Image (tube, rainbow, N blue to C red):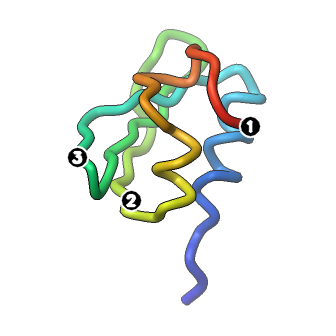
């Protein structure tokens, strides 16, 4: 099974006008909720320890904050 590219997924999500938000964070992993652009209903959630995801998210709490691209 191929690992999903979560950074690409987060970038596509925010580029389409939807929002992702950090639900929980530790130094080793982050849990992110994917929210609809029309009211914020949660449609998916994932936890990742991938260093690329951690770097992409940084200290942001959601995709509306300026950050890495």
Residue 33 in the image: above or below residue 18? below
Q: Residue furthest bottom?
A: 1
In the rendered image, which residue does mark 2 sit on? 48
Toward which corner of the image does residue 10 lie, by quadrant? top right
- For numbered disc 2, what is the local secondary structure? strand
Q: Residue 22 placed where, x, y %?
A: 36, 32
Q: How many marks?
A: 3
Residue 18 in the image: above or below residue 44? above
Q: Residue at x 60, y 84 (%)?
A: 2
In the rendered image, which residue does mark 1 sit on? 69
In the rendering, which numbered label is found on residue 25? none
Residue 20 in the image: above or below residue 45? above
Q: Residue 62 placed where, x, y %?
A: 47, 23
Q: Residue at x 56, y 24 (%)?
A: 63
- Given this view, does label 2 or label 1 mark the residue nearer the observer? 1
The residue closer to the viewer here, 32 or 38, is 32
Q: CA distance from mark 3 to mark 2?
A: 11 Å
- For numbered disc 1, what is the local secondary structure? loop
Label 3 vs 1, first from the N-terminus: 3
Q: CA distance from mark 3 to mark 1?
A: 22 Å
* Left or right, residue 23 beside residue 52: left
- For numbered disc 3, what is the local secondary structure? loop
In the rendering, which numbered label is found on residue 26? 3
Q: Residue at x 77, y 29 (%)?
A: 15
The residue closer to the viewer here, 25 or 1, is 25
Label 2 vs 1, first from the N-terminus: 2
Q: Residue 66 placed where, x, y %?
A: 63, 18
């Amino acid at each position: 099974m191929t690992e999903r590219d979560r950074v690409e997924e987060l970038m596509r999500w925010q580029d389409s006008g939807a929002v992702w938000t950090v639900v929980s964070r530790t130094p080793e992993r982050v849990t992110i909720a994917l929210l609809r652009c029309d009211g914020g209903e949660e449609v998916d959630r994932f936890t990742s320890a991938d260093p690329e995801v951690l770097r992409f998210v940084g200290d942001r709490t959601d995709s509306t904050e300026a950050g890495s691209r």
